Structures are given as structure tokens and as C-alpha cells.
Amino acid sequence: MSHDVGSTVNLEIIRGGQRYGTNVVLAARPEQPVPPVPAQQVTPQQAGLGMSLREVSPQQAQAMGLQSKTYAIISQVVPGSSADRNGLKVGDVIVEADGTADPTPAQVQQAAADGVLVLRVRRRDSFFYAALKK
């Protein structure tokens, strides 16, 4: 579902078991739009949702302020891809993929096999959700 800039969208938020409703007016992203990648330049690595992942060791995770376990971290985002349009950035840590907590890169790839992926992402000290679609 897509909406135009300036449209009002009704959101329902569930937090701590409580439901909250609000209306949001959509605004344009502040940065310049990324030009689309021409089809002839798309490589097999860029197909799909538009991101590459690498594994972070438990020691690296601990140095980043995370629990000492293995995590998937975004190592590349293809400009104009679903990952890019959803605001994902290099260095974002995936803490949940389609309901799987602390997934490995292989588990994220498996969850994305159907072309749809809901991620919970940690960037610095904040968390957000991103819904990606091929």
C-alpha cells in the first residue's frame, strides 16, 4: 500500500499490551532521492531486497554494547533497493527477522526467501522496524 506525500494516515500502535491510535501526515524524506539503478547494472548480489549481511562475533557484539552472542549486521545497501527505501544503513544490527530473535545472516536469508521480510533493527541506542518487499 502506498500513500502520497501530504496524505494523512491512521496508525494503530500496540505497546506494552495497550493500543494507541494516531494520525500522521506523511512528509518527503529530507535527503535527495537516490537515482534508480539501471537494470543492466544489477548483479546477482544486488537482486532481492538489496542488502548484504555479515556475521558479528560475540566479542565484536560485546564491544558494540550488545549481548555477547552472534548477530547479523548490514554490510552493504544497494541504492534504490527495498532496504535503502526503508532507511537501512551499513552497520545496522538485525535483532529480529520475521519473529526470529538474534538471527544469523543465514537465518535472515532464509526468512527473506519468500520476498517479504520484517526486521527489527538496532542503530546505535535505538530500535526500529523495517518491512521489506521484493
Image: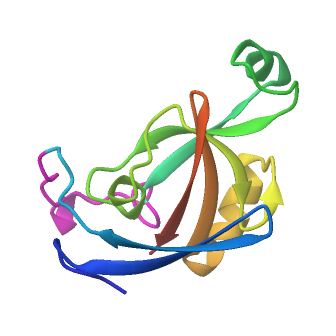
Q: How is the image coloured?
A: rainbow
Question: Where does the image place residue 38, in percent across and percent down from the top left?
Answer: 15, 63
In the image, the segment drawn in magenta is 32-49
Q: Quadrant of residue 41?
A: bottom left
Question: Where does the image place residue 91, in percent across and percent down from the top left?
Answer: 52, 31
Q: Is residue 40 left or right of residue 66?
A: left
- Relative to 21, residue 119 above or below: above
Q: Is residue 98 left or right of residue 132?
A: right
Q: In the rendered image, which quarter contains the N terminus? A: bottom left
- Residue lying at the far right in this picture: please name it: 68
**Is residue 43 shown in magenta?**
yes
Question: Where does the image place residue 36, in percent across and percent down from the top left?
Answer: 16, 61
Foreground residue, 33 or 10?
10
- Residue lying at the far bottom in this picture: please name it: 1
Q: Is residue 21 left or right of residue 46?
A: right
Q: Quadrant of residue 10?
A: bottom left
